[in-house]
Each structure stands twice: as C-alpha cells, then as structure tokens.
Image: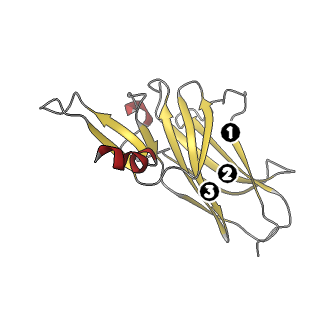
Amino acid sequence: MKKALAPFIDGLFPLKTLSEQIADNRTVYVYRMIPPQHAHDASFGEQITLIGYDLSVEEEVRFRPYWRAVQPPTQNYSMFVHLVTADAPHTLLAQSDGTPADAQRLTKTWTDPAEQFIGSEVILPLFSTAREVELWVGLYDFETGERLNTQSGQDAVRFPIEAHILH
C-alpha cells in the first residue's frame, strides 16, 4: 500500500513534521495538496527564504508566497507587494502590506527551519496600461521600515508582468 501512495505523497507540498509532540512516538506529517506554481529561492537577510509562489494575471494580479525560515528571524517582519512600472520603478501602481503568512504566526515564531509557511493571497488591481509592469515582493521591519536585502543585494524580488493584453 505504501508503494502505491509514494507518487501521490511525492507530489504534495510538505508543511511540517511533528514527532516530539506526539505521545506514542509516531510521526505526523502535515501537507498541502497543491505545491506552489513556481519554485523560487530568494533569501531575505539570511533569515527567511521565499521558496515559491503562485502568480496569475488577468484583470488583476494574484500573488501567494511560500516561505521558510533559514534561521529564527530576529524581528516580526512584514511583507510588501508593489506593482510598479518597469521603466519608472518608483511609480507605484498598487500595493499591499501585511504579514508574510498568517497573522497568528508572526515571523519571530518561525523557529523550525523545516517548517514551511503559506502566505495569504494578495490581490492587486491592474489598470489599463501599455507599459511593462513588475511585481516587487520584499520583507521589512514594520517598526523601523528597514527592508531586508536578498542574497543579490536587492531589497525586493522582482517578477515581470505581461500587461499588454489587459483592458
């Protein structure tokens, strides 16, 4: 029976493994049925990694991040998602700010490097434009406003958005 389930289990997205918390020494695995649409590997401040994301663009931009703490974060970080024009990146078209995952699991509670977190879906309006736009995603300390840099030295991960087919 286990061999028959192996391909199914391999296609799932593991969230957490519990073994010490279970009284009779069993191991419990927590999965999400669907993995991220896109794998990614962007480390912020050598603390938190964006390991994947879902992204769809129609009349609006829909973005969902997937995270993992490389080491326990030193602060409770917030996430920003900005929609900007590619040729004038300081021209903000839409934005969303909030917790990277669930508001009940602030980043300072991310102490297990094997645990993975799924963020809430961010929906940004996409207005009629013939310009190229980008989605910028990053983390910052909400008390100071200081952004965490990625391993490449940027303060956001940038995803190009094809906007020429929108109304």
Residue 106 screen position, x and y as percent:
41, 38
Dot 3 or dot 2: first in sequence order is: 3
* Badge 2 amino acid: His
* Badge 1 amino acid: Ala
| Residue 44 sits in quarter | top right
Say the numbered circle drawn on residue 82: 2
| Residue 124 sits in quarter | bottom right
Say the numbered circle drawn on residue 156: 1
Numbered disc in front, either 3 or 2: 3
Q: Secondary structure at mark 1?
A: loop
C-alpha distance separating marks 3 and 2 = 14 Å
State the scheme by which the image is colored.
secondary structure
Which quadrant of the figure contains the C terminus?
A: bottom right
Which residue is under mark 3? Answer: 55
Q: Nearer the viewer, residue 26 or 129?
A: 26
Q: Secondary structure at mark 3?
A: strand
Question: Residue, x 41% and y 30% (percent of image)?
Answer: 114
Q: Secondary structure at mark 2?
A: strand
Numbered disc in front, either 1 or 3: 3
Q: Nearer the viewer, residue 57 or 90?
A: 57
Residue 69 screen position, x and y as percent:
48, 30
Binning the other alpha carbons within 10 Å of mark 2 as few (below 14), some (14 to 19) or many (20 upward) gives many
Q: Is residue 39 above or below residue 17?
A: below
Q: Is 90 positioned to the left or the right of 82 in the image?
A: right
Q: Nearer the viewer, residue 17 or 127?
A: 17
Question: Residue, x 79% and y 48% (percent of image)?
Answer: 90
* Badge 3 amino acid: Leu
Q: Nearer the viewer, residue 91 or 132?
A: 132
Q: Is the Cβ of the residue at disc 1 closer than 8 Å to that at disc 2?
A: yes
Binning the other alpha carbons within 10 Å of mark 3 as few (below 14), some (14 to 19) or many (20 upward) gives some
Dot 1 or dot 2: first in sequence order is: 2
Say the numbered circle drawn on residue 40: none
